[in-house]
Image: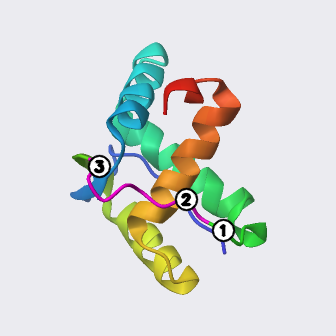
Amino acid sequence: MTAKLTTSSDTRFRNMSLRMPRKAHDAIKALARDQSARASDLYMEIVQGFVLAELPGRRHFFAVENDAPAVTISVSASFAALVRDTASSRKVSSNELIYTAVALHLERDGSAENI
C-alpha cells in the first residue's frame, strides 16, 4: 500500500474523533511542541509512517481502553480515508490502528514510560 504523506495544511481537512489514553495524547502534544509542530500533524506523520513501514508485518494491534477520553484532531481528508480504509482492510478499528502506531512510536522515542 502506498500513501501520500499529508499534513493538516492540505486544502481539504476534517476533524477526526478518536479515543486515546490521556497520557499518550499528552506525550504526543509534548513531542509536537518540542518539534514546533501541531499535534495533528505529528499524529498523521506517525500513523502514515506506521502504515507504510510496519503494518505489512504486523498481526496484532493494541486495544484502547473503553473509557479513554475522546480526542479530536484536525486531519487531511486523505489521511482520514487512509486510516478508515486501512483499518477496514485489517478488520480493526481506527482507534486501534492509531493507538498502535502512537504507542510504538512513543516506546521508541522513550516517551512511553507513563502510558
Q: Is residue 40 above or below residue 62?
A: above
Q: Which residues are magenta?
A: 61-68
Three-letter code, disc 1: His
Where is residue 103 drawn, in percent x and y? 56, 44
Secondary structure, magenta segment, majority class: loop
Count of marks overlaid on the render? 3
Q: Earlier in the sequence, mark 1 or mark 3?
A: 1
Q: Contact (CB < 8 A) between labels 1 and 2?
A: yes
Work out whether residue 36 or residue 56 is closer to the camera in this orientation and state it.
56
Q: Which residue is mark 3?
A: 68
**Residue lying at the far top of the rendered structure:** 34
Visible residue check, residue 11: no
Task: Give the residue pinned by disc 2.
Answer: 62
Quarter the N terminus occupies: bottom right
Determine the CA span between mark 3 and mark 2: 13 Å
Q: Amino acid at mark 3?
A: Ala
What residue appears at the point 33 percent right and 46 percent down from the top-left corner? 8
Q: Position of residue 30 (x, y in %)?
A: 41, 20
Please state which of residues 19 and 29 is positioned toward the viewer in this rendering: 19
Crowd band around label 3 with a 10 angstrom C-alpha radius: few (<14), some (14–19), many (20+): few
For the question of whether residue 69 can be seen, the reply is yes
Identify residue for label 1.
Answer: 60
Q: Quadrant of residue 11?
A: bottom left
Secondary structure beneath disc 1? loop
Q: Give coordinates of residue 65: x percent, y percent.
A: 37, 55
Q: Are marks 3 and 2 in contact (CB under 8 Å)?
A: no
User: In the image, 68: left or right of 2?
Assistant: left
